[in-house]
Image: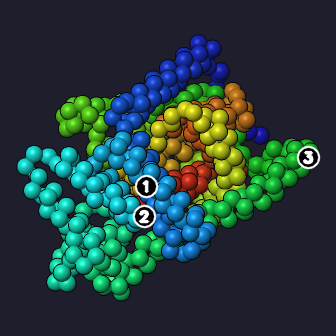
Amino acid sequence: MWAAESPPPEPPAASVRWHTAALLLVVAALFAGTYLSVRSRGAARTSDTARMTLEGLAAARQAYWMSHTGQGGARLAAALKADAVRKLAALARAAPSPSAVRRLALMQYWEGDSRWAATLLGLRDLAPPGRRLDVERELDLWRRVLTPGALRPRDVEDAAARVAGLNLGWFKRIALEALYRNAGENEAARRESEAAQRTTAAFAYLNMVGLLALGLGAVLLLMAARRVMAALREPGGLRWLLPALPPPLPRVQADRLYLVFLAYLGTMAAARFGLFGVARALVHRGGPPSPAAGAAISLAVGLVAVGIPTLMLLWFGRRGGPGFVAIGIRRVAWLRESAWGLLGYITATPLLALAVAVSAWAFRNVSTPMNPAAAQFAASGNHWWQGVLLLHAVLVAPVSEEVMFRGVFYRALQPRLGVGGAALVSAAVFAVLHPQLPIGFAGIFVLGLAFTALYLLRGSLLSAIVAHALNNGVIFISLALLMGT
């Protein structure tokens, strides 16, 4: 009942071989280009700096939380403080910057390490010519802020304003707490301490929600496994299990989708390497783009990459297909499909966590870069550009990638590889084209399979898009809460 009344003739074997060779060539080129770009000296430095910054910040927040709540005892709090100092010191050595020096000095001060004053002297070595006087003024500010009784009452608010303008992030709370306490304003110091704990608690609560979702996901996964086993014992079990399973397309139409996917990969490669190359040549003189430029380019690449494929789908749709309906873009009850996306993502979280844990253990001695968008988010201190990266992660990327990988690529493979084979190949290509290799492959592969399962279960891309957006949103919201002040 799935076949057309007069199916078009099969494409010649040479056409199939050409499509396959072109796909492998484009995927290899994209993989090589992405690998070289994320492994370049500048990109690797940005990724390592972002990772060390986040690790140091997480350690400092955990130590602060344990110390002020009394959880774990004084010995554990002291060990966490020492660990935070060690990580921030490693960051200051690997990527020296005024921000890294200030945060290390504040952590040393809070731990009771008298070397904080010597650490701050490192600002002199980082001062550009002509700014030495500004550094000496800042050193004098820190001496008065961190020394009890050294700040006159009438200078407190001015000093607090200057400290708040030093790009300290969450460490601003530690600095202001010390400032007010040393000035004898204990109520103001208490407010800063509560603010530091409150933002840290929000991150801790998100982790608790994640653990609850993991437990619920395990229950849902067991229920889904029982249903699958029951379905496989019934005649026509696959159709009963997946009532919205889209029928295989005629191979001529599937080959057209193959061309659409190749156009997507080619456009993405041209946009990514072209725009980043222009940014390096004209703006950054061969170096890696700034976090702001990287955010803008990432968004531009995501939008440009789907332009030509979208036009091709429109053109094919007006000439007998395949069009948007054939790949799962159709009118649905968006609230119900969104709920399916949420449940599907929660169900996949135990498998995702297992895949990430096993992969991290297997490749524990292999350096793996952060996702460039996450690294740019962590490195950028501008909330506007962080918003651009968040928009790209939770809207542009889920829509474009689900349409192209699940809607177009899976449907192109389905007639020849079947349901399972097409799901495996499309998920593998999806994982290979992400930059977090090798550790990230297994987790992204599992996500690709989960998104495909949602697509097959619902017959619409919306649930897969929602699940994809949730995954990206959780990552970026975690970063935002961790970095929040």
- Label 2 and label 1: CA atoms lie apart by 8 Å
Which sits earlier in the primary sequence, circle 3 or circle 2?
2
Give how far across and how far down residue 195 sits, in percent: 41, 76
Q: Are marks 1 and 3 in contact (CB under 8 Å)?
A: no
Which sits earlier in the primary sequence, circle 2 or circle 1?
1
Observer able to see residue 311: no
Give how far across and how far down residue 327 sits, in percent: 58, 43
- Label 1 and label 3: CA atoms lie apart by 61 Å
Question: Which of the image's four quarters has the C terminus?
Answer: bottom left
| Amino acid residing under circle 2 | Glu
Which of 251 and 272 lies nearest the eye of the viewer?
272
Residue at 28%, 48% (x, y): give it. 97
Which of 333 and 162 lies nearest the eye of the viewer?
162
| Label 3: how many Cα within 10 Å (few below 14, some 14–19, many 20+) | few
Examine the rendered structure and indicate whether residue 217 appears above or below residue 19. below
Q: Give the residue pinned by disc 1.
A: 85
Residue at 51%, 36% (x, y): give it. 368
Residue at 67%, 37% (x, y): give it. 423
Q: Give the residue pinned by disc 3.
A: 234
- Label 3 and label 2: CA atoms lie apart by 65 Å
Query: Which residue extends farthest front?
Result: 114
Judging from the image, the colouring scheme is rainbow
Give how far across and how far down residue 215 sits, in percent: 72, 61
Q: SS class of the residue under badge 3?
A: loop
| Amino acid residing under circle 1 | Val
Question: Which of the image's four quarters has the N terminus?
Answer: top right
Report the disc number at residue 111: 2
Q: SS class of the residue under badge 2?
A: helix
Q: Are marks 2 and 1 in contact (CB under 8 Å)?
A: yes
Left or right of residue 453: residue 239:
right
